[in-house]
Amino acid sequence: MNQPVPPRPGLGAQKARLAEILRVDQAGELAAVHIYRGQQVVMRNAPGRERIADQLKDMEGHEQVHLNRFDQLLGERGVRPTLMSPVWRAAAFALGAGTALLGEKAAHACTEAVETVIEQHYAGQIAELEARDPALAAELTQFRDDELAHKAVAIEEGALEAPAYPLLSAVIRAGCRAAIKISEKI
């Protein structure tokens, strides 16, 4: 589990840390929207997969609400988005489409893996921000709860039964963790 990052010393350190938090969270929500879009493209074109396509569209809608809020926060607080946005957008769409091509359970395994990392990531940020920015911590708590709901749906739909689940999940989680570290800085 991620531990809260202690405040850095020096002038502007807290502002710089907040910029990292907002930048990485905006990037994560951008990626989530595109994962679901990639999955929907495949599922909408597969006979008998309308239910899952609708389910994915609903989850994309939640992620879009989060993304819109982070876009607003970036503007309000003068924080630039990650320079990696075009790469994350394309990679996320490819991840979504690729896992959907492997089948419904693999698509759900993708959601479960991503949301597991994001849940831990948000938990660390919430703990870090509770004293410094309680309003933002409360928003992140709501977003984390939405992500937990997506994870629960994915597990209920058979994520853990996906072919090669342990490997698929480990690769996706590692990719998410790397994207988080990169997006904080770049």
Image (cartoon, rainbow, N blue to C red):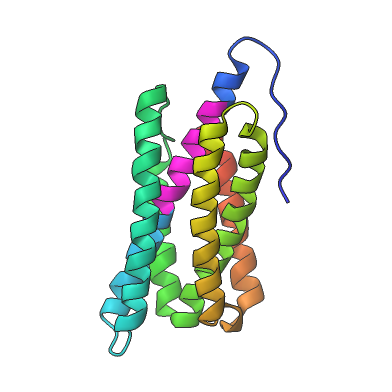
Please state the horizontal and vertical placement of residue 186, each as a whole percent of the image.
Answer: 50, 32
Q: Quadrant of residue 27?
A: top left
Q: Is residue 94 magenta?
A: no
Report the number of numbered marks. 0
User: In the image, is residue 172 above or below residue 68?
Assistant: below
Residue 38 visible in the snapshot: no
Where 29 falls versus 77 (above or below)? Answer: below
Q: Nearer the viewer, residue 26 or 153?
A: 153
Residue 10 image position (x, y, % from top left): 67, 11
Q: For the point 67% across and 39% down, which residue is it?
A: 127
From the viewer's perspective, tell me whether residue 68 is left or right of residue 1. left
Residue drawn where x is 49% and y is 34% of the image:
22
- Residue 128 falls in which quadrant of the image? top right
- Quadrant in which residue 73 is drawn: top left
- Residue situated furthest bottom in the rendering: 48
Please state if 132 lies on the left or on the right of 27 as rendered: right
What residue appears at the point 71 percent right and 37 percent down from the top-left corner?
Answer: 4
Query: Magenta stretch: residue 26 in it?
Result: yes
The image shows residue 26 at horizontal and vertical percentages of: 43, 41
Front residue of this view, candidates 5 and 135:
135
Residue 7 lies left or right of residue 92; in this view the side is right
Pinpoint residue 145: horizontal percent, then vertical percent. Answer: 54, 56
In this orientation, which residue lies closer to the viewer: 9 or 87? Answer: 9
The stretch of residues the image draws in magenta is: 18-31
Q: Does residue 46 lie above or below 57 as drawn? A: below
For the point 56% across and 68% down, the residue is 112
Viewer-nearest residue: 173 or 87: 173
